[in-house]
Each structure stands twice: as structure tokens, then as C-alpha cells.
Image: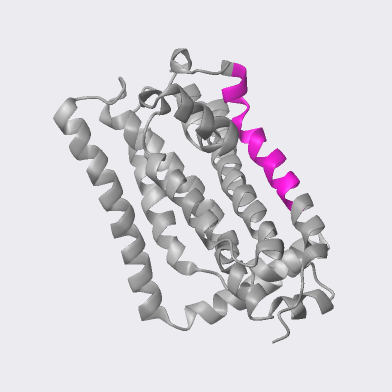
């Protein structure tokens, strides 16, 4: 509870700082919505040309894409500053985090709130709300609860991956290429059923970079397409819990790797 109160205080201060530049914030949000809209428009053109994608019609693809975007947005608003850990370390700013009586991880993620990610929030949740009306899902309290758990779990998976990469920065100083590679993988395949990919790619996106657990597995369960899975349905259904496990392990690694931190001397 103490950590939560500290996070709320620091995040609130960062929010007030960002909110001072309202015109810039508005442009960032519009840009984010436009960027995500272009990504879905490409998928729409493909499905319009071929009718379905691996047997998934446009409504189901939109639902999968919306889940991926919504989960990413839940991750990006509180954890977006992890993308800047390279600069924080190289510029010596991390030294200050170590001498303050606050968890360094909390200080990093509240150093700045990247509110341009609200474009992802607007785009992702709007698309998900529209698509939820188009898919053959009985929206009972249980299915709604599973959807919410899946979105939170997907956000924690991405947070876990980025925390692991950030932890490596204490050894490597620069992890930009690894971060961009991982982000591009998640973005490139976020709106597509993994069944369209070769077996080797499906394995890699399930057990090496756990992309499948973010949106594809939960969407497949909700849409009743578990017969298309290359893994046991029980494993796919447990996707929301995977996020909590991965993020917990990532935080453990982060705190272990802090011992490898060496000040830049700035």
C-alpha cells in the first residue's frame, strides 16, 4: 500500500507536468489514433480482398486487433518510460534513484508519463468496443471478467518483456536494438491469427517471445476457436495468469541486475 501511494503521488506529478502542454498532447493523441488506424486499415484491405484470414472474418480480426491494442495501451501509459532506460543510465540519472528512499523501478516509470499513448487507449478500446458487438460471443459476467483479466494479463506480459530488456541495460548500457526488435515483433503480428504462420514462427511467438499470450490465445478462447490452437486449450485459457508470472519474474531480475549497475560518472 505504501508503494502504491508513492506511485500515485509521483505519477500525479508527472501527469500535471505533461498536461501543461495541451496542444502538443492533443496532437500526440491524434497521431497515435491515426497510426493505429492505418495498421487496422491494412488488415481491412487484406480481408476485403480475400474474404477471411485463416477462417477469421473481419469482425473477429477486429476483435483480436482491438484486444492487442487495448492491452498495449494499458501497458504503455504506466510503463512507457521503460523505453528510455538507456538514456537514464548513460546520463547518470539513475544515480539519484539509488539514493532516494523510493523503489528505483517506481522512480523510473513515473519519471515521465508518455501521454501520447492515450491515442492507443482511444483507438484500442474504441475498436474493441465496436468489434465486441460483431463477434459471436455471449457476453456473460464470466466472459466479460475473462476479457478484462486477459487485457490486464496481456499488458503485464508486455511490461514483463520490457522490464527484462531494461534489466539487461545495467550490463549492456544500450538495449535499443533489442527493444525495437521485440516491439516490432509484437506490433507486426498483433492483428493476425498465428495459425497463418509456419510452425517454427508459432513456436517462437509462444515460448520465446510470448506474443500469443497477449491477445491471440484469449481471443481464440472467447471466440470458440480453440480447435485451431497448436497448444492445449488449458494453456491458452491460462494466458491472463501468464502475465502476472512473467512480470513477477521480470521484477526479480530487475532487482538482481541493479547490482551490476555502474555509474557513468556524469
Determine if the magenta segment contains residue 77. Answer: no
Q: Residue at x 53, y 62 (%)?
A: 176
Of 177 and 197, nearer the camera is: 177
In the image, 219 versus 8, the foreground residue is 219
Quarter where residue 10 is shown: bottom right
- Reply yes or no: does residue 238 show up in magenta: yes
Nearer to us in this view, 137 or 61: 61
Instruction: Report whether residue 180 is seen.
Output: yes
Q: Residue at x 75, y 77 (%)?
A: 263
Extreme residue in the front direction:
172
Which quarter of the rendered picture does the C terminus lie within?
A: bottom right
> Residue drawn 60% across and 40% down?
153
Quick one: which residue is furthest to the left in this view? 49
Location of residue 110 (image quadrant): bottom right
Q: Is residue 123 above or below residue 194?
A: below
Percent position of residue 116, x then y: 43, 67
Residue at horizontal 56%, vertical 17%?
233
Q: Please, which colouring scheme is shown?
A: one colour
Asked if 192 appears above or below 8 in the picture, the reply is: above
User: Does 160 sit above or below residue 229?
Assistant: below
Q: Determine whether, in the image, residue 105 is placed left or right of residue 120.
A: right
Single out the residue that lies furthest toward the top: 227
Main secondary structure type of the part rendered in magenta: helix
Q: How many marks?
A: 0
Residue 126, x across and y down, in percent: 36, 48
Part of the protein shown in magenta: 234-251
Residue 112, position as x, y percentages in the image: 58, 73
Picture quarter containing residue 66?
top left
Whether residue 100 is visible to the viewer of this picture, yes or no, is no
Q: Residue 87, position in %: x, y?
A: 59, 74
Placement of the N terminus among the 4 image quadrants: bottom right
Amino acid at each position: 500500500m505504501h508503494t502504491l501511494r508513492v506511485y500515485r503521488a509521483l505519477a500525479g506529478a508527472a501527469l500535471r507536468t505533461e498536461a501543461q502542454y495541451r496542444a502538443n498532447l492533443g496532437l500526440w493523441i491524434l497521431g497515435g489514433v491515426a497510426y493505429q488506424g492505418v495498421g487496422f486499415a491494412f488488415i481491412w484491405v487484406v480481408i476485403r480482398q480475400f474474404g477471411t484470414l485463416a477462417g477469421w472474418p473481419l469482425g473477429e480480426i477486429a476483435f483480436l486487433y482491438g484486444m492487442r491494442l487495448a492491452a498495449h495501451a494499458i501497458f504503455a501509459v504506466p510503463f512507457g518510460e521503460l523505453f528510455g532506460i538507456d538514456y537514464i543510465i548513460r546520463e547518470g540519472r539513475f544515480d539519484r534513484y539509488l539514493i532516494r528512499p523510493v523503489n528505483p523501478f517506481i522512480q523510473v516509470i513515473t519519471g515521465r508519463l508518455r501521454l501520447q499513448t492515450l491515442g492507443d487507449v482511444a483507438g484500442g478500446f474504441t475498436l474493441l468496443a465496436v468489434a465486441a458487438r460483431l463477434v459471436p460471443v455471449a457476453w456473460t459476467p464470466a466472459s466479460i471478467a475473462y476479457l478484462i483479466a486477459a487485457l490486464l494479463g496481456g499488458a503485464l506480459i508486455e511490461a514483463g518483456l520490457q522490464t527484462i530488456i531494461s534489466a539487461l541495460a545495467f550490463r549492456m548500457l544500450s538495449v535499443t536494438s533489442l527493444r525495437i526488435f521485440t516491439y516490432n515483433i509484437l506490433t507486426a503480428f498483433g492483428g493476425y491469427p498465428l495459425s497463418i504462420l509456419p510452425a517454427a514462427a508459432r513456436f517462437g511467438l509462444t515460448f520465446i517471445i510470448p506474443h500469443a499470450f497477449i491477445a491471440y490465445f484469449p481471443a481464440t478462447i472467447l471466440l470458440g476457436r480453440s480447435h485451431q490452437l497448436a497448444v492445449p486449450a488449458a494453456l491458452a485459457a491460462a494466458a491472463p495468469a501468464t502475465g502476472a508470472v512473467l512480470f513477477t519474474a521480470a521484477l526479480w531480475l530487475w532487482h538482481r541486475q541493479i547490482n551490476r549497475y555502474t555509474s557513468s560518472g556524469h
